Amino acid sequence: MRVAVLASGRGSNFEAIARAFREGKINGEVAVLIVDNRKAGAIKRAERLGVNWLFVDPCSFPSREDYDRRVVSILKHLGVELVCLAGYMKVVSGVFVESFRNRILNIHPSLLPAFPGLRPHKKAVRYGVKVSGATVHVVDEGVDTGPIVIQVVVPVSPDETEESLSEKVLKWEHRIYPQAVKWFVDGRVRIEGRKVIVEGADYTRLPVVPALEDF
Ligand code: GRF
Protein backbone atom coordinates (compact mmCIF):
# COMPACT_ATOMS: atom_id res chain seq x y z
CA MET A 1 0.00 0.00 0.00
CA ARG A 2 1.12 3.55 -0.72
CA VAL A 3 1.02 5.69 2.39
CA ALA A 4 1.57 9.42 2.93
CA VAL A 5 2.79 11.09 6.10
CA LEU A 6 1.92 14.71 6.93
CA ALA A 7 4.13 16.47 9.48
CA SER A 8 4.97 19.95 10.72
CA GLY A 9 7.95 19.45 13.02
CA ARG A 10 10.63 17.09 14.27
CA GLY A 11 9.36 14.05 12.38
CA SER A 12 10.34 11.21 14.71
CA ASN A 13 7.02 9.41 14.14
CA PHE A 14 7.39 9.89 10.39
CA GLU A 15 10.81 8.25 10.66
CA ALA A 16 9.48 5.31 12.70
CA ILE A 17 6.84 4.65 10.04
CA ALA A 18 9.22 5.11 7.10
CA ARG A 19 11.77 2.75 8.68
CA ALA A 20 9.12 0.09 9.26
CA PHE A 21 8.33 0.14 5.53
CA ARG A 22 11.99 0.18 4.58
CA GLU A 23 12.77 -2.78 6.82
CA GLY A 24 9.97 -4.72 5.13
CA LYS A 25 7.88 -4.96 8.30
CA ILE A 26 5.02 -3.23 6.50
CA ASN A 27 4.09 -3.96 2.87
CA GLY A 28 4.33 -0.98 0.56
CA GLU A 29 6.03 2.36 0.91
CA VAL A 30 5.81 5.90 2.16
CA ALA A 31 5.05 7.53 -1.20
CA VAL A 32 5.51 11.06 0.12
CA LEU A 33 6.07 13.20 3.18
CA ILE A 34 4.12 16.44 3.00
CA VAL A 35 5.08 19.31 5.29
CA ASP A 36 3.31 22.61 5.88
CA ASN A 37 6.45 24.12 7.41
CA ARG A 38 9.64 24.64 5.45
CA LYS A 39 11.72 24.31 8.63
CA ALA A 40 10.28 20.95 9.70
CA GLY A 41 12.97 18.58 10.98
CA ALA A 42 11.05 15.84 9.20
CA ILE A 43 12.50 17.06 5.87
CA LYS A 44 16.08 16.13 6.82
CA ARG A 45 14.91 12.75 7.98
CA ALA A 46 13.13 12.18 4.64
CA GLU A 47 16.28 13.08 2.75
CA ARG A 48 18.35 10.70 4.88
CA LEU A 49 15.80 7.92 4.33
CA GLY A 50 15.37 8.64 0.62
CA VAL A 51 11.66 9.43 0.96
CA ASN A 52 10.14 11.97 -1.44
CA TRP A 53 9.00 15.09 0.35
CA LEU A 54 6.98 18.11 -0.59
CA PHE A 55 6.46 21.47 1.09
CA VAL A 56 2.98 22.81 0.46
CA ASP A 57 2.95 26.41 1.60
CA PRO A 58 -0.18 27.38 3.59
CA CYS A 59 0.43 31.04 2.64
CA SER A 60 -0.33 30.23 -1.00
CA PHE A 61 -3.95 29.29 -0.27
CA PRO A 62 -6.84 31.53 0.77
CA SER A 63 -8.40 28.93 3.09
CA ARG A 64 -7.76 25.67 4.89
CA GLU A 65 -10.20 23.97 2.49
CA ASP A 66 -8.24 25.19 -0.54
CA TYR A 67 -5.02 24.00 1.05
CA ASP A 68 -6.53 20.60 1.74
CA ARG A 69 -7.95 20.33 -1.79
CA ARG A 70 -4.44 20.73 -3.14
CA VAL A 71 -3.01 18.17 -0.71
CA VAL A 72 -5.80 15.70 -1.54
CA SER A 73 -5.18 16.09 -5.26
CA ILE A 74 -1.45 15.40 -4.77
CA LEU A 75 -2.23 12.33 -2.68
CA LYS A 76 -4.76 10.96 -5.18
CA HIS A 77 -2.31 11.58 -8.02
CA LEU A 78 0.31 9.54 -6.16
CA GLY A 79 -2.11 6.68 -5.53
CA VAL A 80 -2.02 7.12 -1.76
CA GLU A 81 -4.55 4.98 0.14
CA LEU A 82 -3.67 5.77 3.76
CA VAL A 83 -2.68 9.10 5.31
CA CYS A 84 -0.77 9.37 8.59
CA LEU A 85 -0.74 12.64 10.47
CA ALA A 86 2.38 12.75 12.61
CA GLY A 87 2.90 15.96 14.52
CA TYR A 88 0.86 17.75 11.86
CA MET A 89 -0.25 21.03 13.41
CA LYS A 90 -3.05 21.83 10.98
CA VAL A 91 -6.58 20.69 11.77
CA VAL A 92 -7.68 18.87 8.63
CA SER A 93 -10.90 20.18 7.07
CA GLY A 94 -14.06 18.29 6.18
CA VAL A 95 -12.88 18.31 2.57
CA PHE A 96 -9.87 16.18 3.52
CA VAL A 97 -11.76 13.87 5.91
CA GLU A 98 -14.46 13.25 3.29
CA SER A 99 -11.91 12.42 0.58
CA PHE A 100 -10.11 9.85 2.76
CA ARG A 101 -12.94 8.67 5.03
CA ASN A 102 -11.57 6.14 7.58
CA ARG A 103 -8.19 6.30 5.81
CA ILE A 104 -6.57 9.05 7.89
CA LEU A 105 -4.76 8.24 11.13
CA ASN A 106 -3.38 10.53 13.81
CA ILE A 107 -1.26 10.02 16.90
CA HIS A 108 -1.96 12.04 20.01
CA PRO A 109 0.21 11.75 23.13
CA SER A 110 -2.50 11.29 25.75
CA LEU A 111 -5.08 8.70 26.71
CA LEU A 112 -7.91 10.17 24.65
CA PRO A 113 -10.53 11.41 25.31
CA ALA A 114 -8.42 13.01 28.07
CA PHE A 115 -6.37 16.06 27.11
CA PRO A 116 -7.08 16.61 23.43
CA GLY A 117 -5.51 19.55 21.61
CA LEU A 118 -2.26 21.33 22.35
CA ARG A 119 0.31 20.44 25.05
CA PRO A 120 -1.38 17.31 26.41
CA HIS A 121 1.63 16.36 28.59
CA LYS A 122 1.56 19.70 30.32
CA LYS A 123 -2.18 19.33 30.93
CA ALA A 124 -1.75 15.77 32.22
CA VAL A 125 1.04 16.65 34.67
CA ARG A 126 -0.85 19.70 35.95
CA TYR A 127 -4.01 17.68 36.41
CA GLY A 128 -2.14 15.15 38.54
CA VAL A 129 -3.12 12.04 36.61
CA LYS A 130 -1.31 8.84 37.61
CA VAL A 131 -1.29 7.31 34.15
CA SER A 132 -1.04 8.85 30.74
CA GLY A 133 -0.07 7.49 27.35
CA ALA A 134 -0.67 7.82 23.64
CA THR A 135 -3.47 7.08 21.22
CA VAL A 136 -3.59 6.31 17.51
CA HIS A 137 -7.02 7.17 16.16
CA VAL A 138 -8.94 7.50 12.94
CA VAL A 139 -9.41 11.14 12.01
CA ASP A 140 -12.94 12.54 11.87
CA GLU A 141 -14.19 16.15 11.65
CA GLY A 142 -13.28 16.95 15.26
CA VAL A 143 -9.94 17.57 16.98
CA ASP A 144 -8.55 14.31 18.44
CA THR A 145 -12.07 12.85 18.56
CA GLY A 146 -12.04 9.99 16.04
CA PRO A 147 -12.42 6.25 16.73
CA ILE A 148 -9.51 4.77 18.70
CA VAL A 149 -7.26 2.11 17.13
CA ILE A 150 -4.59 1.49 19.78
CA GLN A 151 -3.52 2.99 23.10
CA VAL A 152 -0.52 2.66 25.39
CA VAL A 153 -0.58 3.50 29.08
CA VAL A 154 2.46 4.78 30.99
CA PRO A 155 2.84 5.63 34.70
CA VAL A 156 3.15 9.27 35.79
CA SER A 157 5.44 9.81 38.79
CA PRO A 158 5.07 12.64 41.36
CA ASP A 159 8.13 14.43 39.99
CA GLU A 160 7.09 14.03 36.36
CA THR A 161 7.53 17.03 34.05
CA GLU A 162 6.07 17.82 30.66
CA GLU A 163 9.48 16.96 29.17
CA SER A 164 10.05 13.69 31.02
CA LEU A 165 6.54 12.47 30.26
CA SER A 166 6.87 13.45 26.62
CA GLU A 167 10.14 11.53 26.30
CA LYS A 168 8.70 8.44 27.96
CA VAL A 169 5.55 8.42 25.82
CA LEU A 170 7.38 9.17 22.56
CA LYS A 171 9.31 5.88 22.76
CA TRP A 172 5.99 4.06 22.74
CA GLU A 173 4.58 6.24 19.97
CA HIS A 174 7.33 4.92 17.71
CA ARG A 175 6.01 1.40 18.27
CA ILE A 176 2.24 1.84 18.33
CA TYR A 177 2.04 4.03 15.23
CA PRO A 178 3.83 1.65 12.82
CA GLN A 179 1.81 -1.20 14.36
CA ALA A 180 -1.48 0.57 13.64
CA VAL A 181 -0.36 1.34 10.09
CA LYS A 182 0.54 -2.31 9.55
CA TRP A 183 -2.90 -3.45 10.68
CA PHE A 184 -4.54 -1.09 8.19
CA VAL A 185 -2.20 -2.13 5.39
CA ASP A 186 -2.86 -5.80 6.15
CA GLY A 187 -6.63 -5.22 5.96
CA ARG A 188 -7.26 -6.36 9.53
CA VAL A 189 -9.18 -3.28 10.66
CA ARG A 190 -12.96 -3.02 10.84
CA ILE A 191 -14.66 0.21 11.87
CA GLU A 192 -18.14 0.00 13.38
CA GLY A 193 -19.24 3.43 14.52
CA ARG A 194 -16.83 4.47 17.28
CA LYS A 195 -15.41 0.97 17.56
CA VAL A 196 -12.27 -0.04 15.72
CA ILE A 197 -11.71 -3.77 15.75
CA VAL A 198 -8.42 -5.34 14.74
CA GLU A 199 -9.18 -8.89 13.63
CA GLY A 200 -7.31 -11.49 15.67
CA ALA A 201 -5.62 -8.98 17.99
CA ASP A 202 -5.13 -9.53 21.73
CA TYR A 203 -7.25 -7.14 23.77
CA THR A 204 -6.52 -8.68 27.19
CA ARG A 205 -3.21 -7.21 28.29
CA LEU A 206 -1.59 -3.91 29.29
CA PRO A 207 0.32 -1.65 28.62
CA VAL A 208 -0.63 -1.65 24.94
CA VAL A 209 -4.20 -2.46 23.85
CA PRO A 210 -4.52 -4.23 21.51
CA ALA A 211 -1.13 -5.87 22.10
CA LEU A 212 1.83 -5.10 19.86
CA GLU A 213 2.60 -7.90 17.43
CA ASP A 214 5.43 -6.64 15.25
CA PHE A 215 6.96 -3.62 16.99
C1 GRF B 1 4.24 13.54 18.96
O1 GRF B 1 4.26 13.50 20.35
C2 GRF B 1 2.84 13.28 18.44
O2 GRF B 1 2.14 12.39 19.23
C3 GRF B 1 2.22 14.65 18.52
O3 GRF B 1 3.24 15.54 18.17
C4 GRF B 1 4.50 14.94 18.42
C5 GRF B 1 5.23 14.91 17.13
O4 GRF B 1 6.54 14.43 17.25
N1 GRF B 1 1.03 14.71 17.71
P1 GRF B 1 7.36 14.04 15.96
O5 GRF B 1 7.31 15.25 15.02
O6 GRF B 1 6.72 12.83 15.34
O7 GRF B 1 8.77 13.78 16.44
Image: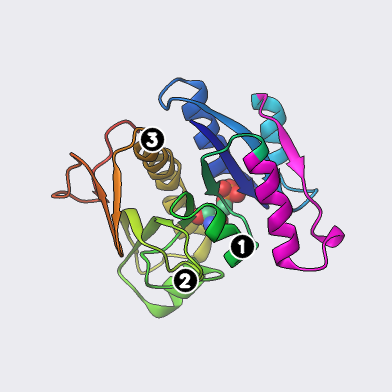
In this rendering, position of residue 176 left or right of residue 90:
left
Cβ of disc 2 within 8 Å of ligand 1?
A: no
Which numbered tag is attached to residue 182? 3
Point out the tag, 3 or 2, that comes first from the N-terminus.
2
- The type of residue carrying mark 3 is Lys
Residue under numbered circle 1: 95
- Amino acid type shown at disc 1: Val
Q: Does any portion of residue 40 appear in the rendered image?
A: yes
> Any mark on residue 116, and which?
2
Secondary structure beneath dot 2 equals loop
Picture residue at 54% right of the left edge, 36% below the top: 3
Residue 187, placed above or below residue 128: above
Q: Which residues are magenta?
A: 50-76
Q: Image quarter for residue 132? A: bottom left
Percent x, y of residue 115: 44, 73
Left-right relation of 77 to 204: right
Tell which tag, 2 or 1, sits nearer the viewer. 1
- Please tell me which residue lies in front, 40 or 78: 78
Q: Secondary structure at mark 1?
A: helix
Vertically, is 46 above or below 146? above
Which of the two marks, 3 or 2, is nearer to us in this view? 3
The crowding category of the residue bearing disc 1, from other C-alpha atoms within 10 Å (few below 14, some 14 to 19, many at least 20), is: some
The answer for how far apart the CA atoms under marks 3 and 2 are is 25 Å
What residue is rendered at 64% in x and 61% in y? 89
